[in-house]
Image (cartoon, rainbow, N blue to C red):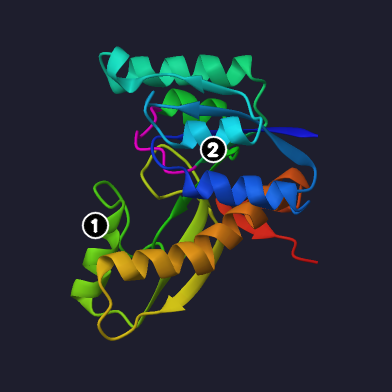
Amino acid sequence: MKNICVLVSGGGTNLQALIDAQNRGEIKGGRISCVISSKESAYALKRAEAAGIPSVVVARKEYPDSKAYSEAILAELNRQKADLVVLAGFMTILDECVTKAYDYKIINVHPALIPSFCGEGFYGLKVHEKALEYGVKVSGATIHFVNEKADAGAIILQGTVAVENGDTPETLQRRIMENVEWKLLPKAVSLFCEDRITVKDGKAYVDLK
């Protein structure tokens, strides 16, 4: 049974999707063993508490720079014996000391179809604002491994939704969360825990049988 550590910074809707999937028995071969938050005030901590999942706060504000903070996160992940790290609305880009130590063991969800609307500065509603500005007809979300570059790791799963006339960044964000993120993130986590993802030449191949 693999230990899944979920890193959060805010409301924790993707964490809740993982908790709900776990409660339904949809995450096979692993369990959420710890939630780590970058903020003491994150509502995600209340979700973890309600689900009986241990949590730890490693506050970003207490560290002088990204490297020092990343080293603290790395130490906590090692302490928790993490087999898989899931970034669920975690708003800090981690230093390569973490990504190298957990190579192909960190999963993130990005609210667009990578390689579109991704990279540094593309997060939250900004992603959906740019997609609507460009006039795309479909958008979606990407579940990918995390490496030292923002949103550049191997793609695991992608899903799409139609962009509707009159969409706002908020309505598009909600449709993508409900129809793609909350479904594909637990699926990707289960695939990892079942050893059904292989990586070759920097690309992820998924056994969906």
Q: Is residue 42 magenta?
A: no
Q: Looking at this view, name the residue that lies furthest to the left.
A: 133
Q: In whole angstroms, how far apart are the C-alphas of marks 1 and 2?
A: 26 Å
Residue carrying label 1:
126
Residue carrying label 2:
47
User: Magenta residues?
Assistant: 88-95
Task: Say which of 35 and 85 sits in front.
Answer: 35
Q: Is residue 88 left or right of residue 120?
A: right
Residue 113 seen from this side: no
Rendering coords of residue 57 (x, y %): 45, 20
Location of residue 138 (image quadrant): bottom left
Position of 135 relative to 22 (above/below):
below
Q: Residues within 10 Å of mark 2 (few under 14, many from 20)?
A: some
Location of residue 32 (image quadrant): top right
Task: Say which of 24 and 144 sits in front.
Answer: 24
Q: Amino acid at mark 1?
A: Lys
Residue 41 seen from this side: yes
Q: Is residue 144 left or right of residue 51?
A: left
Q: Looking at this view, name the residue that lies furthest to the bottom.
A: 165
Residue located 36% across and 44% down the image: 150
Q: Amino acid at mark 2?
A: Arg
Rendering coords of residue 165 (x, y %): 28, 86
